[in-house]
Image (cartoon, rainbow, N blue to C red):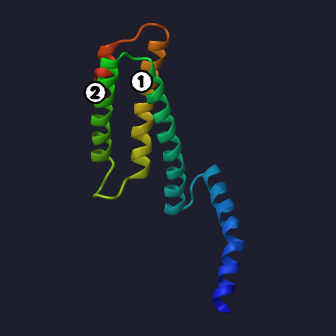
Amino acid sequence: MKTAFAYLFFLMTAPLAAFAQDNACERYPQSTYDHTYCFSKLLVESDNELNEVYRDLRGRLNASLRQDLTQVQRDWMRHRNMVCQEKAGTIIVNCNYRVNKERTDYLRDRLRECKTGNCRPNMIRQESW
């Protein structure tokens, strides 16, 4: 009976906790937990944005340059992991967010250039970090 009550209590309060936590991100995070939670949400969004920009850029390139971009992106991912991991299996969430955002901005600039017909292969092949 106690287990059923505890489970029911959890089901009723979990949405309230999630709502309260989402509101915590709208103001300055009050605790380390808030900080980590809010940055993890931003990290997921930045990762999705990075993947979208990467796909769009890749779709505008010839086969050779696409292959080069893939290799540079893999090198960048190793760099990101090295910079933003204190130890295997963990990440520094705000570091990962920042590095993702920087890479997304760089790739977005390359995409913008390619869309205007001014694609610069040397900039796509370049390690920008």
Give the farthest residue toward the top: 117
Number of residues whose C-alpha sits closer than 10 Å to that of mark 1, classed few (under 14), some (14–19) or many (20 or more): some
Q: Look at the picture and state if 79 lies above or below 109.
A: below
Residue at the (67%, 55%) spot, across then down: 23
Which label is found at residue 19?
none
Residue at the (28%, 30%) spot, across then down: 71
Q: Look at the picture and state if 95 lies above or below 56.
A: below
As rendered, which of 4 and 10 lies closer to the eye?
Answer: 4
Residue at the (28%, 58%) spot, across then down: 88
SS at badge 2: loop
Left or right: 40 in relation to 89:
right
Residue bearing mark 2: 127
Q: Position of residue 37 (x, y in %)?
A: 53, 57
For the residues labelled 2 and 1, the Cα–Cα distance comes to 16 Å
Left or right: 14 in relation to 109:
right
Looking at the rendered structure, the kind of residue marked 1 is Arg
Please report contact status of discs 2 and 1: CB closer than 8 Å, yes or no: no
Q: Look at the picture and state if 60 lies above or below 100.
A: above
Number of residues whose C-alpha sits closer than 10 Å to that of mark 2, classed few (under 14), some (14–19) or many (20 or more): few
Residue at the (64%, 55%) spot, across then down: 22
Which label is found at residue 58?
1
Q: Position of residue 116 (x, y in %)?
A: 49, 9
